[in-house]
Image (cartoon, rainbow, N blue to C red):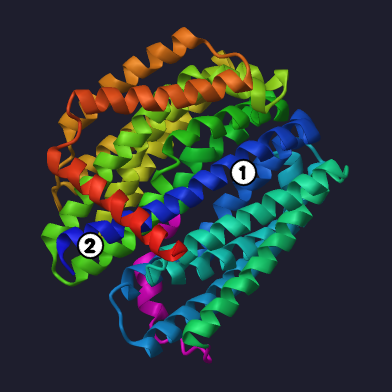
């Protein structure tokens, strides 16, 4: 396949996943007001803390086998090898996930009293414990579609999964089942979609009794990544627990809602990594270093094209968004959004460069990088939260993200250098600043004016970026051709 065709395929796959994530983002925006208003500050805080606990234990249960499947089978053509390794990995994750679910169930009393500072949370933790196993198996099943680069099917499945989850959660909340209904809905939804994914996988490659023949090498590759997931959890989410300890569960709920909005500056990062990693793994294993660097270059460029204006926009719209999506109790968290949003943009360099670290097999490096950021984050949280409240946690998050992103970028350039498109990043900042001034002038207060401000901001940003030549002529020509080809295919399908 020619490089331009390869990039077009990459762009198409990325488009699928971005569209899916936009749909999921909109679903979450629908879910947030239902949960915050239906559960209240206290139960929403418990819900947030439970999700954080699950997010810590799921990567441990996976033992990075979901990543190993993508890394080592992306260029594999032997169906028997793919079938055996996938089923073997799934079997191992089933065991580790079950063990950790039982572990959380047995420790629910201790966690509720010592960390949540609310013994009533014990009941909810017990119900949620099975989500470790369910979420692990669900993510493991999705790794097959990433490895096969079946991004259209992958995107469709995750959208339907999230539609179903949000529908069940909203229904249970509106029926008055509160947090119990939300947790049970999550469990039921997870089981259904694990079965759906397995049925599809069975039709594509069949099943066989696992031999576990390659699991030792997979686990050896993935073991250094296990503490990374835990350390990254500390950086991303431990502030909620520290806030809960010093300020109470209510403050953790307020911070969590604002943090969620700030993280939307990186809504494109997840789709990008999902598509980028199997693509560059295949090119790297085939010795195509130039193409590998090319994908990294354009990934950073187009990631910044979306992430930078998103951070600016979310910062200026933080208060109206919280006002529309939550209750008045949550609006005080608006000061958190800019720190999280801009910190997340710098953090994205870590996620992209992490792909390089995994390609060259230097996975142990990330322990040191993440360790530095985690220690810094915890120290700053304990120092700042008692003095200045939740804004202290936001400042700690920004500093930790910035240090992690910059250090990772410096370290990985020893192994693989690629164009960072710095002039473009500068132009994106300029365009975003002008866009922000325009939104500030509109000063939206209602939902309608917030939506109008977002649309106007997008148009202003891309207009300014085009005027100051943020894109080359060849890129503009490529995009036009790409859009025309896509519309032509849609027309053909209709015909």
Instruction: Tell me where residue 368 appears, x and y as whole percent.
Output: 32, 47
Q: Quick check: can you spot residue 21?
A: yes
How many angstroms separate mark 1 from mark 2 (CA)? 32 Å
Q: Quick check: can you spot residue 357?
A: no
Residue at 20% in and 48% down: 478
In the rendered image, which quarter contains the N terminus?
bottom left
Instruction: Name which quarter of the figure residue 302 lies in.
Output: top left
**Residue at the farthest top position:** 441
Q: Are marks 1 and 2 in contact (CB under 8 Å)?
A: no
Question: In the visual, does 132 lie left or right of 419?
Answer: right
Q: Nearer the viewer, residue 102 or 30?
A: 30
Magenta residues (range): 207-228
Q: Nearer the viewer, residue 115 or 152?
A: 152
Instruction: Tell me where residue 176 appears, x and y as whole percent.
Output: 88, 42
Q: Is residue 434 above or below residue 114?
A: above
Q: Total marks drawn?
A: 2
Instruction: Name which quarter of the figure residue 158 lies in.
Output: bottom right
Label at residue 6: 2
Q: Is residue 71 above or below residue 309?
A: below
Q: Nearer the viewer, residue 394 or 147?
A: 147
Instruction: Name which quarter of the figure residue 395 lies in.
Output: top left
Neighbours of disc 1 within 10 Å: few (<14), some (14-19), many (20+): some
Instruction: Tell me where residue 166 appears, x and y as whole percent.
Output: 68, 49
Q: Which residue is mark 1?
A: 27
Secondary structure, mark 1, is helix
Q: Is residue 216 magenta?
A: yes
């Amino acid at each position: 396949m020619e490089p331009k065709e390869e990039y077009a395929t990459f762009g198409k796959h990325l488009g699928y996943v971005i569209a899916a994530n936009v749909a999921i983002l909109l679903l979450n925006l629908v879910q947030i007001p239902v949960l915050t208003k239906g559960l209240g500050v206290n139960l929403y805080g418990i819900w947030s803390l439970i999700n954080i606990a699950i997010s810590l234990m799921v990567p441990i249960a996976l033992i990075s086998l979901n990543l190993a499947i993508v890394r080592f089978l992306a260029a594999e053509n032997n169906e028997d090898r793919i079938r055996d390794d996938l089923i073997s990995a799934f079997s191992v994750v089933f065991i580790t996930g079950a063990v950790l679910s039982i572990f959380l169930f047995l420790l629910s009393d201790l966690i509720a009293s010592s960390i949540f500072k609310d013994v009533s949370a014990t009941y909810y933790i017990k119900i949620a414990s099975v989500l470790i196993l369910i979420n692990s198996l669900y993510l493991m099943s999705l790794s097959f579609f990433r490895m096969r680069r079946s991004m259209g099917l992958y995107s469709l499945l995750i959208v339907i999964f999230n539609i179903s989850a949000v529908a069940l959660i909203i229904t249970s909340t509106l029926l008055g089942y509160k947090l119990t209904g939300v947790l049970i809905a999550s469990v039921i939804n997870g089981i259904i979609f694990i079965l759906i994914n397995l049925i599809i996988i069975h039709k594509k490659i069949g099943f066989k009794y696992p031999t576990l023949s390659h699991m030792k090498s997979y686990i050896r590759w993935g073991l250094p990544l296990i503490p990374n997931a835990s350390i990254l959890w500390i950086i991303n989410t431990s502030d909620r627990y520290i806030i809960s300890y010093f300020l109470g569960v209510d403050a953790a709920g307020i911070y969590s809602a604002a943090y969620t909005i700030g993280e939307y500056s990186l809504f494109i990062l997840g789709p990008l990594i999902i598509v980028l990693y199997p693509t560059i793994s295949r090119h790297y294993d085939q010795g195509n270093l130039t193409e590998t660097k090319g994908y990294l270059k354009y990934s950073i460029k187009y990631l910044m094209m979306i992430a930078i204006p998103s951070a600016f926009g979310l910062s200026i719209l933080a208060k109206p968004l919280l006002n529309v999506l939550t209750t008045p109790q949550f609006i005080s968290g608006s000061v958190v959004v800019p720190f999280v949003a801009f910190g997340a943009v710098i953090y994205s360099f870590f996620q992209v460069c992490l792909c390089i670290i995994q390609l060259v097999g230097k996975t142990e490096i990330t322990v040191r990088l993440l360790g530095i950021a985690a220690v810094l984050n915890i120290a700053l949280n304990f120092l700042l939260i008692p003095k200045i409240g939740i804004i202290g946690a936001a400042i700690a998050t920004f500093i930790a993200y910035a240090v992690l992103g910059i250090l990772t970028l410096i370290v990985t350039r020893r192994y693989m250098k690629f164009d960072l498109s710095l002039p473009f990043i500068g132009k994106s900042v300029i365009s975003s600043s002008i866009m922000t001034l325009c939104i500030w002038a509109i000063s939206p207060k209602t939902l309608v004016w917030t939506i109008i401000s977002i649309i106007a901001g997008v148009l202003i940003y891309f207009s300014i970026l085009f005027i100051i030549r943020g894109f080359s002529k060849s890129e503009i020509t490529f995009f036009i051709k790409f859009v025309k080809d896509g519309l032509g295919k849609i027309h053909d399908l209709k015909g």
